[in-house]
């Protein structure tokens, strides 16, 4: 039985309320990658325990519980993807600086100076990488 099938059978399931509450709670705070990661991990761990204790999943195999957890993780990450995978201003600046330095590095580090087999020393690939 998949996650949504399980939820649809008993829509009053407290797990849906916990899910919705987490999405709202998470979305109402300023982004902080470290804290956000910890919040998502904590929520998923708590939900895994809630699945195991909930009568809806009583008698389910470990595989079914794992599948429900993975389904929930997919729902959470899909719902929060624009925020979870957004660039942090510090990262944007670091990426910009790195992008400016790469052409300079390419001027003096050549494929032949690296331990790259001759067959893979393709100038086009080198410029793109």
Image (spheres, helix red, strand yellow):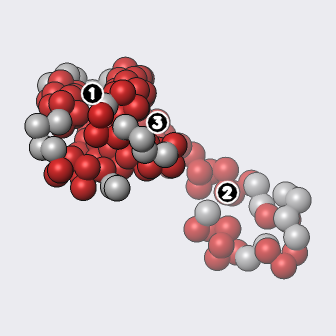
Check the image and report above or below for 5 versus 57: below
The spot of residue 60 in percent (x, y) is: 43, 44
Residue name at image x 62 percent, y 68 percent = 127
The residue tagged 1 is 31
Residue name at image x 36 percent, y 49 percent = 71
Circle 1 packing at 10 Å, graded few (<14), some (14-19), many (20+), is some
Q: CA distance from mark 2 to mark 1?
A: 35 Å
Q: Answer whether labels 2 and 1 touch (C-beta < 8 Å).
A: no
Quadrant, the C terminus: bottom right
Q: CA distance from mark 3 to mark 2?
A: 18 Å
The spot of residue 36 in percent (x, y) is: 34, 26
Rendering quarter of residue 40:
top left
Residue extending farthest left: 12
Under tag 1, what secondary structure? loop
User: Which one is in front in this view, the residue at disc 3 or the one at disc 2?
Assistant: 3
The residue tagged 2 is 106
Q: Earlier in the sequence, mark 3 or mark 2?
A: 3
Under tag 3, what secondary structure? helix
The spot of residue 55 in percent (x, y) is: 30, 34
Quadrant, the N terminus: bottom left
Q: Earlier in the sequence, mark 2 or mark 1?
A: 1
Q: CA distance from mark 1 to mark 3?
A: 18 Å
Check the image and report above or below for 5 versus 22: below
Left/right placement of residue 115 relative to residue 24 reads right
75 or 38: nearer the eye?
75
Left/right placement of residue 42 relative to residue 110 reads left
Indicate which disc residue 94 carries.
Answer: 3
């Amino acid at each position: 039985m998949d996650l949504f099938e399980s939820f649809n059978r008993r829509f009053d399931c407290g797990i849906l309320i916990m899910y919705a509450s987490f999405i709202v709670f998470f979305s109402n705070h300023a982004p902080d990658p470290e804290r956000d990661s910890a919040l998502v991990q904590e929520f998923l761990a708590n939900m895994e325990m809630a699945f195991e204790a909930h009568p809806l999943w009583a008698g389910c195999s470990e595989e079914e519980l794992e599948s429900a957890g993975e389904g929930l993780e997919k729902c959470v990450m899909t719902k929060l993807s624009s925020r979870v995978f957004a660039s942090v201003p510090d990262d944007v600046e670091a990426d910009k600086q790195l992008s400016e330095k790469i052409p300079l590095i390419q001027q003096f580090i050549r494929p032949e100076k690296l331990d790259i087999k001759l067959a893979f020393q393709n100038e086009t690939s080198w410029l793109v990488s």
